[in-house]
Image: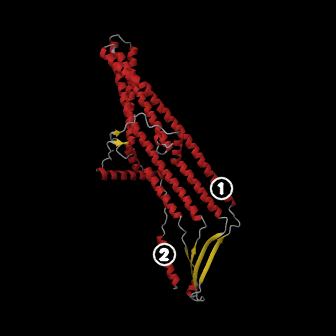
Amino acid sequence: MPRSVVCAVPCVCALFFTTGCFQSTHSNAGDRAIAAYHAYQTDKARSAENSSGGQPVPAPNPLTADLAVQLAKAASPRLAELKARLSAASAKVLAEGVLPNPELRVSQLRADQVAANQAHERTALRVFIPRPGEIDSKTAVARAAEAEADAALRAGQAEIEAEVRWLFDDVLLLESQLAASAAVAKTRLELSTRTHAKLQSSEATLLDDALAELSAVHAHQDEQELQADRKAALAALLVRIGADPNAEVNLQGDAKEWPPPALPSDQTLVETALRYRPEVHVAAAGIDAAFARAAAVRAKRYPWFTFLEVGYEVGPNIPAGQGWTFQGGIDLPIFTIASSAVDAADSAQSAAQQNLTSQAVRIAGEVKLAAQKVRAAEALVTDLKTRALPVVDKAGQAVKRALETGEVDLLRALTVDERRAVMELRLIVATRNYRARLADLRRTVAGPIPRSSEVKP
């Protein structure tokens, strides 16, 4: 048997056995999701067993907002996915920068010629030559995809940070609101008790008694709802950081600190958002990708080599050393000169540029609206602290002095004290609303909000 046949047989067998066969699972999406969730739970339980003897991972106690953000990012499956997508996109950039593999070609052999020892064996190496700029174009498209993946990752991190900081502040404010609500409920219960006693001595009417009792029940219900809200907010926070949702932790921080750091100007906030918002990075990457595709399309308008081939042929009638062969192919853009493709690429470039402008204008509007809501909420809290707090303190001192000197009956004193507690509760509600608007602004900016003192003139 000729040497070429002997060599070809093991090569074909090796190619057959090393080529994997794709088998589609065709499994139900719901079943796959359930299996993935069970696997995630199993991995989480195994990690807990290794770190804490099989018990739920305890929350750090005390817990700070910065530490909560750090733990939430580490425990997020979504961020793990986005990091994997970024790694895949980065690997794609490297893959697109590699030259195409050459091709080893072996001539066709006829059985009768092989048997008569008259076969001509030709082996050649064919090299495919990319057009000028083709590899750079593919690499640029891959880099655009990498930029999109990186933007998605940073957006996911910013979303987690905004959510965790809001939950952290919300738990603290709910604790303060719960304490104020408990004071209101206690005062109203005392009012109801005193009014009922006056009813027994005919010093109050049934309507007075019913009104006081309803007010006390309403305050108690508010207190119960706030307890449930605080428990839910704390559980949500602990779930985000991968800890036991039923744990009780001591949160270190003061969400009622006032005045808060002043916001910078709208212009600064808008520019910050335009640096961090993922839509901007995706739109900018789209411009780069459109430019790269346009360059690749324009290159196809000119002739270029499709391949170059160098070979050697061996046969009975070929003198030794003179069997070298050379081949080449050139793509001639005669019937298709890619004019329509170039027009389409130019239109895509224009659309990509307009998309960036559109995204910038939309984001600027969102940031300005969110900043306006923050400033309005801040002004309300400041007004309450400036105008209401002195009145509240004055009322509290008046009630205390009146009770000590006996200048007023207990029922009137409790009424004044109840209104004072309601004002304190309203202040905490306004502060909580401010923190909620600030969390919305963090999500809108998708990056660190600079303080006004940090902004360079």
Indicate the position of residue 296 as horizontal and vertical percent values. Answer: 62, 62
Tag 2: amino acid: Cys
Residue 434 visible, this angle: yes
Q: Position of residue 234 (x, y in %)?
A: 37, 39
10 Å crowding of disc 1: few (<14), some (14-19), many (20+): some
| Mark number displayed over residue 181 | none
Q: Answer with left or right where residue 399 lies relative to residue 136.
A: left
Q: Identify the residue at the far right of this view.
A: 335
Q: For residue 348, what is the image quadrant?
A: bottom right
Closer to us: 109 or 40: 40
Q: Is residue 98 above or below residue 457?
A: below
Q: Which secondary structure, mark 2?
A: helix
Q: Residues within 10 Å of mark 2 (few under 14, many from 20)?
A: few
Q: Is residue 174 above or below residue 313?
A: above
Q: Is residue 109 visible?
A: no
Place of residue 421 in the rendered image (x, y in percent of width and height, measured from the top left): 38, 24
The amino acid on which the numbered mark 1 sits, given as a three-letter code, is Asp
For the residues marked 2 and 1, what is the alpha-carbon distance in whole angstroms? 49 Å
Horizontal side of 392 relative to 372 (left or right) equals left
Quarter of the figure with residue 170: top left
State the residue position of label 1. Answer: 346
Residue depicted at x 69% and y 60%: 339
Contact? badges 2 and 1 (CB < 8 Å): no
x then y, percent, for residue 363: 55, 43
**Residue hosting label 2:** 13
Q: Residue furthest top?
A: 202
